[in-house]
Image: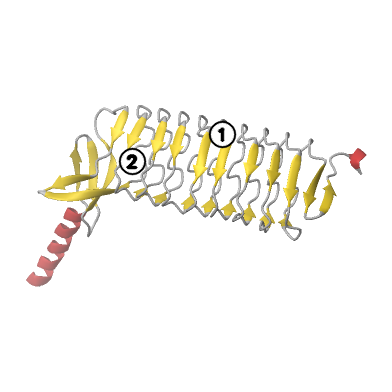
Amino acid sequence: MKRFIFYLCFLVVSFAVSAQSLTQNGLIFSVIEGTSQVSVKGIRGSLPQNLVIPTSIDIEGKPYLVTLIEEEGFSMCSEIKKVTFPNCLIRIGKRAFYMCNGLVELTLPQSVAYIEKEAFFMCKSLYTLSLPSSLTSIEERCFWSCASLSFVKIPESVKSINREAFFGCSALSSVEFNKGLEVIDRLAFGSCFALMNLDLPNSLVVVGDQAFWNCTSLLEVKFSPFIAKIGDSAFGQCSSLNKVVIPAKDVVLGKDVFEYCPELKTYKKGDEIIKLILTLEDI
């Protein structure tokens, strides 16, 4: 019995050590169990305009690499204008910088492989964004309503841009899509009012429902020959859209792909010119 009680006490102590939190230079860290790594949990005290997250911290003389920013770690920290990330950072947690309205510049190191959903949700002042080539997806609502963002380059490593990833980025006028992208999900670029032209890569297979819905400045779209599906209302309410070319004749088109696009009278699908019925007069 004594041996059993000792074993239980050992487990409790081991868990407490592996989950310990500590503060260094105002940042709160937590040891990631079973590793020589720590996560950043948040900040204690006054917030700096230029937040610097260190590469490592020392605990009892041993270095621990900073590899994770935890969920809601810096949520609603509007004083932060710029963040310097370490080159060993791997993951940025859900809502880590949620509604950080002062954040202007964001350069993510090449070590970052995962940015969880809503990580930079509604960072209204974010103007400069550099994404790492280690990302394989851009998660749901990751940059939702980042209203000052004007340009984004999607790395070749990214296979999917998920639901509402850039929804409401009203100043976004240009997106550079690199080869490798396969899926643009539902409402991924919905209500990007300034977006004018799309140069979609040959790797793109699926454009989801309402993917570019309400992009009112969009003028022209040309798909690759390998596009397989364009979802319901994918370009609905794109009121300036006047030219669409779909080389693949066997592409699956959803319902009302081009609904409420008054400037688009016809579009080309394979060798066929398809006329849109916009009003009763067009019948």
Callout 2 amino acid:
Gly
Tell me how many marks there are: 2
User: Residue 139: x and y, percent?
Assistant: 48, 49
Report whether residue 78 is seen.
yes
Name the image quarter holding the C terminus. Answer: top right
In this picture, is 282 found above or below 150? below
Callout 1 crowding tier (Cα within 10 Å): few <14, some 14–19, many ≥20: many
Q: Position of residue 200 (x, y in %)?
A: 62, 48
Residue 187: where, in percent of width, then height?
Answer: 60, 44
- Residue corresponding to mark 2: 73
Q: Position of residue 175 (x, y in %)?
A: 56, 40
Q: Using the numbered discs, state the Cα–Cα distance from disc 1 to disc 2 in whole angstroms.
A: 27 Å
Q: Quadrant of the N terminus?
A: bottom left
- Residue 12: quarter of image: bottom left
Q: Nearer the viewer, mark 1 or mark 2?
A: 1
Identify which residue, 246 or 240, lies in the foreground.
246
Residue at 9%, 71% in the rendered image: 3
Q: Residue at x 68, y 50 (%)?
A: 223
In-front residue for pair 73/109: 109
Where 204 sits versus 147, above or below? below
Image point (29%, 28%), residue name: 48
Q: Which mark is residue 172?
A: 1
For residue 6, side relative to residue 149 (left or right): left
Image-based side of 194 in relation to 250, left or right: left
